[in-house]
Amino acid sequence: MYTIEVLITLLMGASAALPSKQIDISANPDLIVGGAEATLHEFKFIVDMRKIGLHYCVGSVISQEWVVIAAHCAQNPASSYTLTAGDHNIVEIEGVEQVRYVVNILIHPNYSRPGFLSYENDIALMKVSPPFEFNEYVQPVILPEAGFDPTDIATVIGWGALTEGGESPSKLMKVDVPFVDDATCNESYGGAVAASMGKAGNIHSGGPMVCGADQTLCGIVSWGNGCAREGYPGVYTETSYFIEWIRGAKTPMEEDASPVQIITSCGGRIQSTSAAINFQIGDSIGPNQRCIWTVEAPYDALRFQLISSGLSDYDAIYLTNFSQADLGCQQRLSIVGQNYTVSSSVVIITLAVGNVSTSGFSLEFYSSGFRHDTPNFTGYLATSEKTGSYTYPEDGGSYLDNENTLFIIATPTPQPRILSFTKFDVEVCGNNLPPDIMLEEGIGLLSFQSDHIIARSGFAFQWMYFSHEIRILLTHPGEEDGAALLGPRQHNFSSFYNASRGKSTGKVFHWYLSFT
């Protein structure tokens, strides 16, 4: 799978209702071969994870706000999942369940990254809202200390299939599995097992593995060859190997006392916990000036404050959220002293000046909270060229797994441009070119993301002036022309802002388009 997006306006998503109890056997990756039904509420930490309302994986409660799970179960946006604690029969409502929304996902930074083995560092944390309430049915699991020595026999829990290719049970199951030494396990898999992976008995993919009478979480089921096949032990993420990462990731960080960076340039990429953008303070800014700054912070909350401003009512500073939960959500800053906080670690700051000169401003931001799930950009481009073209990957070949890219087009003159794809070779859509897109004021943000499987040769795009000939083509496309004019009336989108003075309208539209 891949996602390619053009960010050009405000997009708001509605909250999904809590899911009814149902199970999709085809989507369930858990396998509990040879298991027996667990005693009712025997494992109070167990969590039924659902993706778009259907049972998908199993997690473990580690605090009132956090659940630990395999990273391979957490590859979709947080809004795709709900977590239910206190469950036993996942197709019946038993009256003690606690259903929670997932509001943040922290995947280990080295999961499925270049230089690591497949499924190495297969661990993630999910933050829920509202917090779980601990009672006789819901309690946190015990986490091991670093260097924990597992017992000879461990227990795997879940709602997984009882046979390879078989149906999944509705009631919670458990099975005891023996640990296998590293040498034997590596021999079975040709050396593809890392030190952070545990090895035990047969494969039972998806659920937590506990050791001892106190049910210490000694592993998270990761991968294996088939289901309980002879000679192929199941491979588990050793929880003790990641205990410091778990503790650090769920500990909130405070804001810096003052900005650690001072930025004076028109636009740029800011990777910091805090910064002050002091642009032309006390000096003039020319008419129609546009600047775009990309803020990349490590934590899940960003607070912005306008410290001083010489901008007029016809000028605008806009913040565009780049988080998956609120992608495209925007806020205009105009009041000195005003604070605006977003739940995101990536925000695009846009300055748009009307058609007469104005004065500078100072804007500060501070990052705080928990580590965020937004991966680092694997590709990034910010250009102010009037016209141009770009190919990704730049050096040819195929794009990588787990790509997260951002391309910013901010032309120096507020005139319409057409963004068109000249090459498109990605999973699912194949070689079908997306329609041309009009950038009303020559500003566009394009994002491309890929998953962990199937990589192809990528795409190329160009931006050019919006001519009369192109207007005719876009307004009246022929049957074999793949172009279409994307306007507010057609797609029910609202304008981003309207900064104007005199005869110049300075209107800018921002769109969000997704090709999947």
Image (cartoon, rainbow, N blue to C red):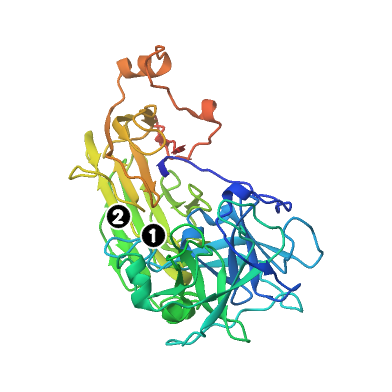
Mark 1 touches mark 2? (CB < 8 Å): yes
Q: Nearer the viewer, residue 495 or 302?
A: 302
Q: Whole-Å distance between the Cαs marked 1 and 2?
A: 8 Å
Classify 42 as above or below 50.
below
Which residue, given by chain and number where applicable, does mark 2 sit on?
Answer: 378
Task: Check the image and name the residue furthest to the right.
Answer: 95
Please give the name of the residue rendered at 53% of the width and 30% of the height, measured from the top-left corner. 491
Query: In what quadrant of the picture does the C terminus appear?
Result: top left
Q: Is residue 361 visible?
A: no
The tally of labels here is 2
Task: Check the image and name the residue furthest to the front.
Answer: 230
Q: Nearer the viewer, residue 434 or 352?
A: 434
Classify 502 as above or below 172.
above
Which residue, given by chain and number where applicable, does mark 1 sit on?
Answer: 375
Query: In what quadrant of the picture does the N terminus appear?
Result: top left
The percent coordinates of residue 220 (x first, y second) are: 51, 71
The percent coordinates of residue 51 (x first, y second) are: 59, 53
Q: Is residue 405 rendered to the left or right of residue 37? A: left
- Tell me where residue 47 sits by quadrant: bottom right
User: In the structure shown, which secondary structural element does the residue marked by tag 2 occupy?
Assistant: loop
The percent coordinates of residue 508 (x first, y second) are: 42, 37
Classify 352 as above or below 251.
above
User: In the structure shown, which secondary structural element does the residue marked by tag 1 occupy?
Assistant: loop
Q: Is residue 3 visible?
A: yes
Q: Which amino acid, mark 2? A: Thr
Q: Is residue 416 rendered to the left or right of residue 129? A: left
Q: Which amino acid, mark 1? A: Pro
